[in-house]
């Protein structure tokens, strides 16, 4: 097997899609156009041969529901019920397509925006909000859903995923670790180090980069003069560049990369080219750095609208089904809102719980100092 320098290439394995490469000028995998036209691709069609109309409807429903969840969380933040929220608007296909490709024993290491992936992994609705409300230090037990606590330190999760993948390798199982990160993270040294380790030890890890065009306010073109997918082959990691707003293409690419890792083929880097239609977080104002015409252009590539157009053209999305999906999305959002408002503030001193496996005098002193500080407030124990 040789490493190909070109983006969009999936290096095969014995019994798989061997040494296939994109034709000239077609460096991004796409199976569903923005207009809803289904394209054929001999390299990736086989990976989604089981996705019929019903399965595509399920993916469509997932995307509608997670967009509704995202909108409700944004509203909760604007109403003062959350301290912050990082919206995923526009990135639903990247997250649902890849999330639904995973097995239950795979382990996810994400950044702070992968709410759709967490939804696919089975995270509770309220668990998505606990950290952002400030009522918990993590939303869920990572081992309950095989997804680590979202990482705020940019790019650090790629090292965590690679280390976990080496553990999988040592255990002799065929599970896979998956690291999610944004385009901005690829400028961090952690990502380069993770790629080196993964390539060196042929670790069963998939690096999933959601290139949403902006690292906060910095456009991707300032830090990536070439497609991001071209970087990985330099480390010895083959890559696939995929239309991140095409749920079928993302699902196919993810399945191919996961299969390669499971069969001993090592790591794969996926660049999902998508777009963050909302702000970086609810504390950000994208109108200060983004041309409205650019946003309008990407709205025409909406990941949900293209699936809707495709299903509608096939006569598989009637008014009754649309209504049922929207009603489900609204029910889920209402349940999440009610759960959020019912969250109780934790005892302030619990911030010291679980910091270390065993307590020690230094932590005890800090806890005592903080306790005495709290008693200085009206309503404190020392009033």
Image (tube, helix red, strand yellow):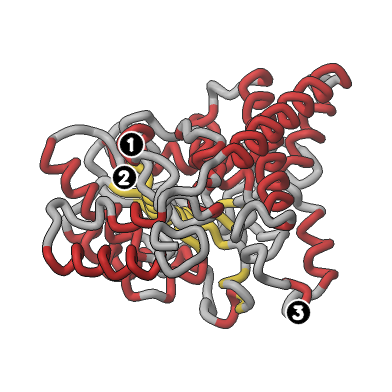
Q: Which disc number belongs to residue 106?
A: 1
- Name the residue located 69 percent from the left edge and 42 percent from the top edge: 67
As drawn, 111 above or below 362: above
- The residue labelled by disc 2 is 177
Q: CA distance from mark 3 to mark 2?
A: 37 Å
* Among numbered discs 3 and 2, the one appearing first in the sequence: 2
- Name the residue located 19 percent from the left edge and 63 percent from the top edge: 364
In the rendered structure, the answer to whether residue 160 lies left or right of residue 377 reads left
Comparing labels 3 and 1, the label whose residue is closer to the camera? 3
Query: What is the secondary structure assignment of the residue under circle 2?
Result: strand
Query: What is the secondary structure assignment of the residue under circle 3?
Result: helix
Q: Which disc number belongs to residue 288?
A: 3
State yes or no: discs 1 and 2 in contact (Cβ < 8 Å).
yes
Q: How many marks?
A: 3
User: Please, which residue is most extreme toward the bottom here?
Assistant: 222
* Among numbered discs 1 and 2, the one appearing first in the sequence: 1
Q: Quadrant of the C terminus?
A: bottom left
Q: Position of residue 84 (x, y in %)?
A: 60, 60
* Among numbered discs 3 and 1, the one appearing first in the sequence: 1
Residue 87 falls in which quadrant of the image?
Answer: bottom right
Q: Position of residue 231 (x, y in %)?
A: 41, 69
Q: Position of residue 273 (x, y in %)?
A: 59, 58
Q: Residues within 10 Å of mark 3 (few under 14, many from 20)?
A: few
In the rendered structure, the answer to whether residue 24 lies left or right of residue 368 reads right
As drawn, 38 above or below 94: above
């Amino acid at each position: 097997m040789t490493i190909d320098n070109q983006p969009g290439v999936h290096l095969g394995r014995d019994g798989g899609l061997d040494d296939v490469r994109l034709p000239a000028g077609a460096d991004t995998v796409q199976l569903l156009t923005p207009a809803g036209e289904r394209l054929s691709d001999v390299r990736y069609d086989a990976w989604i041969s089981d996705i019929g109309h019903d399965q595509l409807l399920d993916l469509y429903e997932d995307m509608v529901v997670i967009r509704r969840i995202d909108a409700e969380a944004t509203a909760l933040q604007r109403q003062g019920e959350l301290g912050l929220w990082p919206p995923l608007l526009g990135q639903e296909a990247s997250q649902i397509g890849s999330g639904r490709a995973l097995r239950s024993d795979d382990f996810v290491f994400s950044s702070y925006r992968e709410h759709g992936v967490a939804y696919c992994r089975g995270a509770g609705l309220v668990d998505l909000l606990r950290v952002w409300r400030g009522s918990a230090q993590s939303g869920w037990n990572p081992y309950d859903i095989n997804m680590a606590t979202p990482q705020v330190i940019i790019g650090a999760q790629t090292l965590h995923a690679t280390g976990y993948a080496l553990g999988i390798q040592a255990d002799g199982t065929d599970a896979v670790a998956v690291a999610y990160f944004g385009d901005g993270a690829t400028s961090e040294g952690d990502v380069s180090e993770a790629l080196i380790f993964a390539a060196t030890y042929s670790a069963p890890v998939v690096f999933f980069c959601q290139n949403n065009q902006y690292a906060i306010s910095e456009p991707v073109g300032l830090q990536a003069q070439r497609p991001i997918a071209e970087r990985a082959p330099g480390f010895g990691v083959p890559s696939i560049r995929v239309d991140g707003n095409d749920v079928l293409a993302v699902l196919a690419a993810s399945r191919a990369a996961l299969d390669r890792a499971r069969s001993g083929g090592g790591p794969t880097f996926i660049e999902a080219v998508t777009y963050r239609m909302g702000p970086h977080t609810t504390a950000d104002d994208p109108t200060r750095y983004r041309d409205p015409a650019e946003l309008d252009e990407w709205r025409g590539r909406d990941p949900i609208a293209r699936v809707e157009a495709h299903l509608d053209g096939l006569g598989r999305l009637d008014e009754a089904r649309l209504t049922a999906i929207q009603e489900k999305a609204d029910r889920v959002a209402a349940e999440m809102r009610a759960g959020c408002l019912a969250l109780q503030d934790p005892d302030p001193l619990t911030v010291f719980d679980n910091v270390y496996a065993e307590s020690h005098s230094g932590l005890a002193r800090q806890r005592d100092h903080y306790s005495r500080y709290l008693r200085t407030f009206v309503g404190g124990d020392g009033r």
